Image (tube, helix red, strand yellow):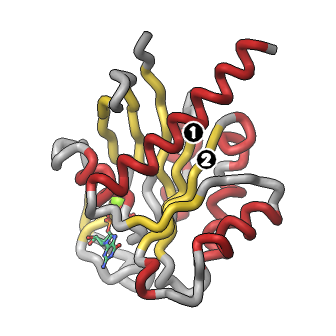
Amino acid sequence: MSREVKVLITGPMGAGKTTALASVSDGRALKTEATNSDLKQHQKSHTTVALDFCEIELSAGDRLRIYGTPGQRRFNAMWKILAKGSLGVVVLLDLTRPDPIADLREYLADFSEVVAESCAVIGAGRSEERPDLSVSMIADACAELGLMLPVFAVDVRQKADVLMLLEALFSQIEIAHALSEES
Ligand SMILES: Nc1nc2c(ncn2[C@@H]2O[C@H](COP(=O)(O)OP(=O)(O)O)[C@@H](O)[C@H]2O)c(=O)[nH]1
Ligand SMILES: [Mg+2]
């Protein structure tokens, strides 16, 4: 039986959330971009103000509805709306930011309700520029918060990398739901 599942992708401004949805949907994702007035945060010209959205079909015919959050905190009223009914969350990090582990903690805390009730995976972007910061160090930071989360080094401009994150998240969701149906 194929299912339809809602998941979120979040993380700091410029981590590549909009890019991830564009690559996984071959450019068909819905975007809500406006001119970036926050150039101190990130030098890019445009930024997400409400949400990104796309729907994709996974290998087994299951459908994922993916919502990307705006990265800037001043839009975080949107976060609660987007989090409603989500079964999983991808936290996307940009390892070239000043303190990606602090970013990780911050986004896991902001989405703690979704993380606690559902599933999460971590995407570590631009990892090649931070060889000192390994995937296992990021996994350890999750473990310190009591969370056993899969961490993948990704380049979200590559569709295969985004699919890997989403497939990993979906299998966690499947396992969690199979278990809860049993109990
Ligand atoms: N060099 C490099 N650039 C990346 C990588 N991932 C994303 N980007 C770029 O970083 C920018 C991210 O912007 P955007 O997707 O708007 O980020 P958002 O704020 O999270 O939605 C885009 O220009 C991407 O092409 C990566 O792994 N390496
Ligand atoms: Mg965006």
Work out whether 44 lies above or below 173: below
The structure residue drawn at horizontal position 66% and vertical position 53%, both measured from the top left corner, is: 149
User: Mark 2 highlights which residue?
Assistant: 120
Q: Earlier in the sequence, mark 2 or mark 1?
A: 1
The structure residue drawn at horizontal position 50% and vertical position 46%, both measured from the top left corner, is: 78
Residue 84 visible: no
> Residue 164: x, y in percent?
41, 49
- Three-letter residue code for mark 2: Ala
Badge 1 residue CB within 8 Å of ligand 1: no
Work out whether 44 lies above or below 105: below
Helix, strand or loop at label 2? It is: strand
> Residue 53: x, y in percent?
33, 41
Which is more toward the observer, 119 or 79? 119
Which quadrant holds residue 143?
Answer: bottom right
> Residue 39: x, y in percent?
36, 82
The structure residue drawn at horizontal position 51% and vertical position 87%, both measured from the top left corner, is: 131
User: Mark 1 highlights which residue?
Assistant: 88
Report the quarter where the N terminus lies: top left
Residue 164 visible: yes
Relative horizontal placement of residue 176, taking residue 98 as reference (left or right): right
- Three-letter residue code for mark 1: Gly
Task: Please tell me how crowded label 1 is: few (under 14), some (14-19), or many (20+) other residues with Cα within 10 Å.
Answer: many
